[in-house]
């Protein structure tokens, strides 16, 4: 299986590359500058410069793009739209590293985590930008996409337990009443979905057991 990891230099990206390599997959890191991941194959390009030809032949493209400042938040939508356009009409799967703020907290799917009174104001613009990108992604029936939301507490330095609970559109708590997952366990879930998953045109979520 051939996998491209877009924005592979970030903490999540590097762990996703590492997880894929540990399973013997053919991994290419897509980075804007110097490759800092463990991948030996590299495409050195800005995400907006990627073409259909660049992504041709990959079984899976994992999008790990993230933006955090007010002026760059709209890029959650524009970068995802660009990748969708590049993959439109192909069999290549697009797996998107998403956010937890848009997970639903009621069965009617009218309220989200970010609507809650305890959701920090500082994260609301980011959650809104990522929710907008997901809403737009849902319209792309021309792309084999899967959106993967982490748990609410997404821990960059958390331990790799090798276990997680696969859930759906609603915020899911583990047996301890927690919504938490490490980047390392999230990376396992991403590669599990790439290798064995079939959640096409679906948003799924993962939480630590």
Image: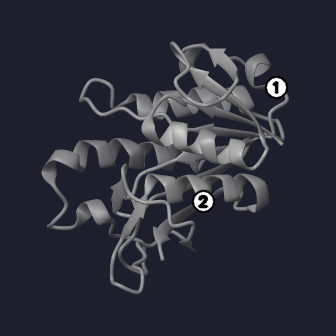
Task: Name the residue tied to disc 2.
Answer: 189
The answer, for residue 101, to whether it is visible in the render is no
Picture coordinates of residue 176 (x, y %)?
35, 84
Image location of residue 109, percent across then percent down: 42, 72
Rendering quarter of residue 198: bottom right
Q: Is 35 or 110 nearer to us in this picture? A: 35
In this view, the residue in front, 201 or 40, is: 40
Total marks in image: 2
Are there few (<14), some (14-19), or many (20+) residues within 10 Å of tag 1?
Answer: few
- At x 42%, y 63%, the residue is 181
Name the secondary structure under disc 2. helix
Q: Is residue 163 visible?
A: yes
Q: Tell whether 82 sits left or right of 177.
A: right
Tell me if residue 92 comes above or below residue 41 in the rendering: below
94 to 120, vertically: above or below: above
Q: Is residue 23 left or right of residue 148?
A: right
* Residue situated in front as seen by the camera: 100 or 5: 5
Q: Which residue is mark 1?
A: 56
**Colour pattern:** one colour
Residue at 42% x, 81% y: name it: 174
In percent of the image, x 27 and y 59: which residue is there?
114
Q: Residue at x 42, y 78 (%)?
A: 108
Specify whether 145 is left or right of 195.
left
User: What is the x, y in percent for residue 194?
Assistant: 72, 52
């Amino acid at each position: 299986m051939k996998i491209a990891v877009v924005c592979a230099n970030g903490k999540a990206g590097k762990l996703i590359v590492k997880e894929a390599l540990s399973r013997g997959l053919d991994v290419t890191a897509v980075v804007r500058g110097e490759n800092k991941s463990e991948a030996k194959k590299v495409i050195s390009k800005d995400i907006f410069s990627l073409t259909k030809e660049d992504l041709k032949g990959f079984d899976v493209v994992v999008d790990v793009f993230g933006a955090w400042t007010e002026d760059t938040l709209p890029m959650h939508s524009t970068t995802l739209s660009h990748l969708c356009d590049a993959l439109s009409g192909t069999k290549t799967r697009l797996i998107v590293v998403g956010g937890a703020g848009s997970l639903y907290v009621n069965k009617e799917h009218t309220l989200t985590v970010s609507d809650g009174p305890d959701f920090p104001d500082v994260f609301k613009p980011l959650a809104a930008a990522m929710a907008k990108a997901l809403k737009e992604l849902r319209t792309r029936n021309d792309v084999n996409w899967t959106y993967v939301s982490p748990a609410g507490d997404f821990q960059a330095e958390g331990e790799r337990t090798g276990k997680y609970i696969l859930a759906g559109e609603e915020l899911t708590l583990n047996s301890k009443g927690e919504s938490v997952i490490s980047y390392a366990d999230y990376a396992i879930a991403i590669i599990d979905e790439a290798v064995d998953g079939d959640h096409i045109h679906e948003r799924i979520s993962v939480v630590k057991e």
